[in-house]
Image (cartoon, helix red, strand yellow):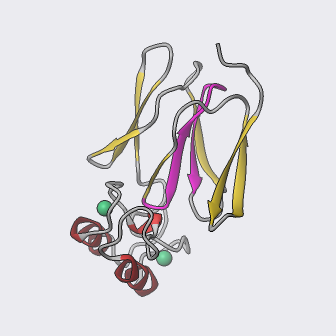
């Protein structure tokens, strides 16, 4: 039985702490990163969406039950399940799709960032999790297509 202590998790790059975020209870599941957003469930009953670059919370959703499963991403939605057995689906558009640098609009800088990471896989030197918009652990043509689709858009 997991304990209900606040839990922090940390984003690190080359061993240096980039940001940390504290939830109300244990984080049992693995977070998933897609389109510059970290999705994670916590035993505190919430699903959190965090900005992958800054760790700032974009939103959280209270399921009322511990969320122990790891999120799955498919067809532009994030799926999570709680211990109660409910499955939740969230749109991945909390951040504007393709806004790799998080400045609120999809533009040339994002395209350049994606180009620099193009062809990279998770763990590569030029890997950029924000550029992996569809969350399949490689920056490829489909990510480029998604960025192109949203080119010129601004955050709601
Ligand atoms: Ca941008
Ligand atoms: Ca991808």
Q: Nearer the viewer, residue 89 or 19?
A: 19
- Marker count (numbered): 0
**Regarding ligand 2, which quadrant of the image does it lie in?**
bottom left
Q: Residue at x 29, y 73 (%)?
A: 119
Answer above or below: position of 6 versus 143. above
Q: Is 17 positioned to the left or the right of 73 in the image?
A: right
Q: Is 57 positioned to the left or the right of 152 in the image?
A: right
Horizontal and vertical percent position of residue 26: 67, 29
Q: Main secondary structure of the magenta part?
A: strand
Residue 44 forms part of the magenta stretch: yes
Answer above or below: position of 3 versus 129. above
Residue 86 forms part of the magenta stretch: no
Q: Is 2 positioned to the left or the right of 86 in the image?
A: right
Answer above or below: position of 102 versus 85. below
Pick out the residue farthest to the right: 5
Horizontal and vertical percent position of residue 51: 58, 58
Q: Nearer the viewer, residue 59 or 118?
A: 118
Quadrant into which the N terminus falls? top right
Horizontal and vertical percent position of residue 133: 36, 61
Magenta residues, start to end: 35-51
Query: Splitting the image into 4 quarters, where does residue 140 fall?
Result: bottom left
Q: Residue at x 53, y 33 (%)?
A: 29
Answer above or below: position of 131 versus 57. below
Horizontal and vertical percent position of residue 108: 41, 87
């Amino acid at each position: 039985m997991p304990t209900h202590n606040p839990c922090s998790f940390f984003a690190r790059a080359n061993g240096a702490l980039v940001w940390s975020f504290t939830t109300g209870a244990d984080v049992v599941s693995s977070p998933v990163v897609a389109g510059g957003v970290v999705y994670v469930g916590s035993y505190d009953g919430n699903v959190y969406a965090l900005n992958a670059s800054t760790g700032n919370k974009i939103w959280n959703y209270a399921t009322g039950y511990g969320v122990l499963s790891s999120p799955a991403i498919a067809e532009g939605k994030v799926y999570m399940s709680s211990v109660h057995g409910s499955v939740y689906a969230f749109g991945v558009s909390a951040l504007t799709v393709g806004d790799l640098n998080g400045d609120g609009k999809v533009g040339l800088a994002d395209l350049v960032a994606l180009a620099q990471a193009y062809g990279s896989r998770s763990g590569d030197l030029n890997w950029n999790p924000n550029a992996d918009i569809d969350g399949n652990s490689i920056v490829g043509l489909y990510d480029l297509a998604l960025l192109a689709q949203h080119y010129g858009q601004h955050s709601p």
